[in-house]
Image (tube, rainbow, N blue to C red):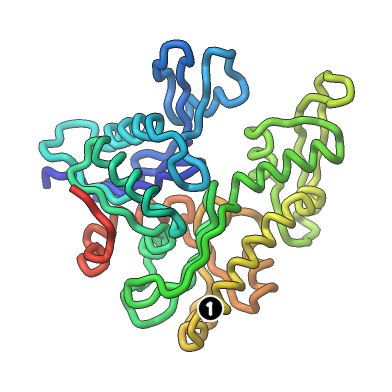
Amino acid sequence: MLRKDIGIDLGTANTLVYVKGKGIVVNEPSVIAIDADTGEILKVGMEAKKMLGKTPSNIKAIRPLKDGVIADYTIALIMLKYFISRACEGFNLFKPRVVIGVPIGVTDVERRAILEAGLEAGANKVYLIDEPMAAAIGSNLDVEEPTGNMVVDIGGGTTEVAVISLGSIVTWESTRVAGDEMDEAIMQYVREMYRVAIGERTAERVKIEIGNIFPKKEFDELETTVSGIDLSTGLPRKLTLRGGEIREALREVVMTIVESVKNTLEKTPPELVSDIIERGIFLTGGGSLLRGLDLLLEKETGISVVRADDPLSAVAKGAGIVLERINILKKLQGVG
């Protein structure tokens, strides 16, 4: 009763923290703003993200995670401490037990860095769980049953595809192509087609507002206005972008994700494939919200696709819940 159990989705784009009994208590961008001259932390999370691309030379807005792993250990540790302290606000006699979701493809060195950061950030015990397993648990799938579940978790930095049975991952594929690459593809498209430079936040907004990947009349009719710098004149310029052209901009990135799903299916034992055909492919993560992605995957694989009820919070929720699943917890790497 006195100890808090915490699940963390330490994402490239956003960090979510789940506390048992309270649900998601933190959902903020994985960004920190620091004063480059003094090293002082100015803002963390949403307030820091607002500074991206808008800071003077002495202020840096930093994303300390890249492709789902820690790129800047010192900054990531500060961010982790901040989010854990937010989750533990109020009287708390004991240090929390923390489970952190990580991409399947991370190296042992990267895993060790995340474990150590968790301990340094104030945890009593730290466990790491593969993100697709956490997403499956957070989506209420029966992962300990002898049946196959396929989970496709599309985050900001990585896409994780895994087939799960009997509490373990049987086959998997991890690709460092996900939401960030979609934003980059939109920036590149606008630069090449219109000779206009737009920023990361603008590209992300375009993806959210009109991003799509399946030919449908309602998607073609979507449009939004963006402002950028005309590369020919150096002056500001406004553009109207439409759904059909954004679909083309995203095609190459999304087909990389589709190929990962196909490759994983090819490696999956036939008995588990029959379970997947019966139960469908489960989509989680922020990238799964891209319009028409479920339809494209169904067309390419011939298998029905189900989007999780709350795809954004599935990993954090599953990471918190796993502390109650003793059989799975025993298999996780942990320290403390």
Q: How many numbered marks appear?
A: 1
Figure quadrant of residue 194: top right
- Report the residue that reaches farthest toward the right: 232
**Does residue 313 sit above or below 59 in this rendering?**
below
Figure quadrant of residue 57: top right
User: Between 202 and 187, which is closer to the camera in this rendering?
Assistant: 187
Q: What's the amino acid at mark 1?
A: Lys
Q: Residues within 10 Å of mark 1 (few under 14, many from 20)?
A: some
For image coordinates 47% across by 40% down, the residue present is: 65
Please give the residue where the numbered disc 1 appears in the rendered image: 267
For image coordinates 54% across by 82% down, the residue present is: 277
For image coordinates 54% across by 48% down, the residue present is: 157
**Does residue 296 sit above or below 207 in this rendering?**
below
Residue 19, horizontal then vertical, whole percent:
28, 46
**Does residue 170 sit above or below 118 in this rendering?**
below
User: Between 23 and 193, which is closer to the camera in this rendering?
Assistant: 193
Q: Secondary structure at mark 1?
A: helix
> 126 left or right of 47?
left
For image coordinates 66% across by 61% down, the residue present is: 256
> 246 left or right of 308?
right
> 183 left or right of 272?
right
Figure quadrant of residue 257: bottom right
Residue 250, horizontal then vertical, whole percent:
72, 52
> 12 left or right of 52?
left
- Report the residue that reaches farthest toward the front: 109
Residue 262, horizontal then vertical, whole percent:
61, 73
**Does residue 196 sit above or below 171 in this rendering?**
above
Residue 238, horizontal then vertical, whole percent:
82, 28
